[in-house]
């Protein structure tokens, strides 16, 4: 059940170029240092200037994993934000805006307007100073102390020099004082947590997880929304001893990380769906050469260029079909930023042990969403297992790089280790790495090598945890999701339980290998099953059905570029129960 005593959502709206991220960062630092949990989602466009942006910042005394269903306080930095969202605000909410440039329309019942006379409050000609004044007023309206804001402003603008710091502190003080003297708002007392928290984006979590796993080579071509991984790696590479390269295209990226992995370095790359499309031939090359390497796909709305700054779970079948032929691979869809961090060492150990490529499917929602976390939950020294890796010289007669072992896993020598000469190429080969196409293409040898590689996956389920039900075993409805839907389904289950609907949740993280028996048992035991996913065609459902042969009772799908909110899931379940709907699709684009 929902145990939150404090749950407050602030939204800041404007256009690209208005510096919306800055007030968001300033406020986020205040809240997490206070020990409060945060989740932010930025709905933005793919142009450098212009286009509507709405940054959600949800704050709670308990862990939160989505941006929620409501907005308590809306800061309008331009007229467009006011025009778009004022009519959607609910009773008890507040709208802060620059009264010099913005005119409100019809005000819904119960919504309080808080106009700020920006020109009267500052002599600065910097048009972005309105943001700082607004932040000051927000702190006052939330009943906060100014010293915390002063500290956060000093931290944020320190690199710009003391003059800029002083200017922003003065502007924030003016907004703070004006709100205290002229505006009123009734809000819950903002609590404090037991200790300060930290905050990261999913892309940063993935990068840090890779570093903890021992990654020594990272390559990428910048592609939204995966570029944050490259930024983190480039910023920290020197301190961590990681070689980072920005390559001319994704084909070069994929082949370069495979080369580094062949030389013995743990290597990875990140891209989005369009870039991963160019990498797929290299995925097959890693499969044929049995080289462990990790590919990260931060999914966005497709096809083609699609909607570059919007989220979607649309690349599952691309990952399943990456490259031609049959070969072992891992595909994993972490459920959150923290889970993504923890997954990276686990995946690298698996790819090393089974000598095959691994793919990580997150999406813009996880990759660019920022969420608080407890640093004590982070293990910076995870267990590292390099598998059957030969690194020392030895006398070896007739080293068989692709020896046909019972497990299918062959001893892997790092290139250049004396006594272990072998050929590595993308053609099919014999046990001793002789290319089959260089002689008579023996069908017996070809079958042997395909079966050898395939045998690896016969025991892999023992190394990968099976999905488990979250919630009561006797639920009337079982919601099935994968990857980033975990957080929003988790809260929807709480809300439905409060309404008397007995619901549980089956989150699936490991796609390949797939725990067919475990999923089949759970689905067969469920009274009603509904699959929730962020794509049009039900990609995960089709995959699950291909693996289990099972159908489900209903679907909740979203594919407008924006993520699910908890009420979307709640409405879908209630409508399914009332009208036996097959597929429920939320029609609203964005609601505050």
Image (cartoon, helix red, strand yellow):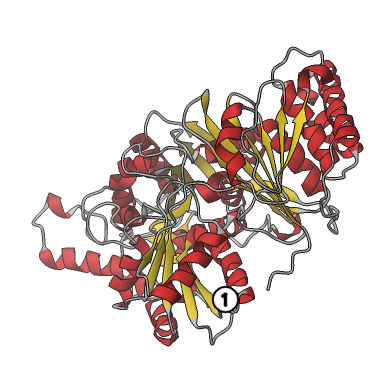
231, 22: nearer the viewer: 22
Q: Position of residue 569 (x, y in %)?
A: 50, 64
Identify the residue shown where x is 37% and y is 77%: 516
Q: Can residue 386 be seen?
A: no
Identify the residue shown where x is 81% and y is 23%: 168
Identify the residue shown where x is 58% and y is 83%: 472
288, 367: nearer the viewer: 367
437, 115: nearer the viewer: 115
Q: Position of residue 258 (x, y in %)?
A: 39, 45
Query: Vertical placement of 197 versus 556: above or below?
Result: above
Count the numbered circles shown: 1
Q: Which quadrant of the structure image shows residue 381?
A: bottom right
Say left or right for 186 vs 409.
Answer: right
Query: Vertical placement of 280 versus 287: above or below?
Result: above
Query: Which residue was labeled with disc 1?
Result: 470
Could you classify mark 1 by the number of other residues whose Cα lies within 10 Å: few (under 14), some (14-19), or many (20 or more)? some
Say left or right for 183 vs 470.
Answer: right
418, 165: nearer the viewer: 165
Q: Position of residue 242 (x, y in %)?
A: 57, 39
Say left or right for 209 vs 510.
Answer: right
Q: Position of residue 583 (x, y in %)?
A: 36, 65
Which quadrant holds the N terminus? bottom right
Q: Which quadrant of the structure image shows residue 471?
A: bottom right
Query: Vertical placement of 46 versus 92: above or below?
Result: above
Q: Can residue 343 be seen?
A: yes
Q: Secondary structure at mark 1?
A: loop
Say left or right for 181 vs 239.
Answer: right
């Amino acid at each position: 059940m929902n145990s939150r005593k404090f749950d407050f959502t602030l939204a800041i709206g404007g256009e690209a170029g208005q510096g919306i991220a800055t007030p968001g960062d300033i406020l986020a630092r205040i809240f997490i240092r206070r020990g409060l949990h945060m989740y932010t989602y930025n709905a933005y466009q793919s142009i450098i200037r212009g286009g509507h942006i709405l940054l959600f910042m949800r704050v709670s005394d308990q862990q939160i994993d989505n941006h929620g269903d409501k907005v308590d306080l809306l800061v309008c930095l331009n007229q467009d934000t006011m025009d778009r969202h004022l009519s959607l605000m609910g009773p008890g909410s507040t709208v802060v805006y620059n009264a010099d440039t913005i005119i409100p329309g019809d005000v819904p019942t119960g919504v309080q307007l808080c106009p700020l006379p920006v020109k009267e409050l500052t002599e600065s000609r910097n048009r972005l100073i309105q943001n700082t004044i607004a932040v000051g007023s927000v702190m006052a309206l939330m009943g906060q102390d100014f010293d915390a804001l002063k500290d956060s402003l000093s931290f944020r603008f320190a690199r710009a020099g003391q003059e800029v710091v002083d200017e922003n502190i003065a502007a924030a003080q003016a907004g703070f004082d004006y709100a205290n003297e002229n505006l009123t708002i009734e809000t819950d007392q903002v609590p404090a947590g037991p200790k300060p928290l930290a905050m990261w984006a999913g892309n940063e979590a993935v990068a840090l997880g890779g570093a903890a796993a021992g990654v020594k080579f990272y390559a990428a071509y910048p592609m939204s929304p995966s570029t944050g991984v490259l930024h983190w790696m480039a910023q920290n590479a020197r301190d961590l001893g990681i070689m980072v390269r920005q390559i001319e295209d994704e084909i070069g990226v994929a082949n370069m990380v495979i080369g580094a992995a062949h030389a013995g370095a743990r290597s990875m790359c990140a891209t989005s769906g369009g870039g991963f499309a160019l990498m797929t031939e290299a995925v097959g090359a890693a499969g044929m050469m049995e080289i462990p390497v990790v590919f990260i796909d931060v999914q966005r709305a497709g096809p083609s260029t699609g909607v570059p700054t919007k989220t979607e779970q649309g690349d599952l079948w691309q990952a399943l079909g990456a490259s031609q032929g049959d070969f072992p691979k891992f595909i994993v869809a972490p459920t959150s930023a923290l889970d993504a961090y923890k997954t990276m060492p686990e995946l690298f150990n698996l790819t090393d042990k089974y000598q095959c490529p691994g793919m990580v499917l997150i999406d813009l929602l996880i990759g660019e969403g920022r969420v608080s976390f407890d640093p004590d939950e982070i293990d910076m020294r995870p267990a590292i297992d390099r598998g059957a890796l030969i690194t020392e010289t030895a006398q070896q007669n007739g080293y068989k790089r692709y020896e046909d072992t019972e497990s299918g896993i062959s001893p892997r020598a790092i290139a250049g280790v004396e006594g272990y000469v072998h050929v590595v190429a993308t053609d099919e080969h014999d046990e001793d790495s002789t290319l089959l196409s260089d002689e008579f293409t023996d069908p017996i040898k070809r079958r042997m090598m395909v079966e050898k590689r395939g045998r690896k996956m016969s025991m892999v389920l023992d190394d990968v945890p099976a999905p488990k039900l979250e919630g009561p075993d006797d639920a009337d409805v079982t919601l099935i999701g994968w990857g980033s839907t975990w957080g929003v389904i988790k809260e929807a289950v709480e809300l439905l339980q409060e309404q008397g609907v007995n619901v549980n949740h089956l989150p699936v993280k490991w796609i390949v290998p797939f725990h067919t028996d475990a999923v089949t048992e759970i689905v067969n035991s469920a009274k009603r099953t509904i699959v929730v996913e962020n794509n049009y065609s039900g990609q995960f459902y089709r995959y699950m059905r291909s693996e289990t042969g099972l159908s489900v009772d209903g679907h909740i799908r979203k594919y407008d570029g924006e993520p699910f909110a908890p009420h979307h899931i709640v409405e879908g379940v209630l409508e399914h129960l009332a009208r036996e709907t097959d597929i429920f699709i939320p029609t609203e684009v964005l609601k505050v």
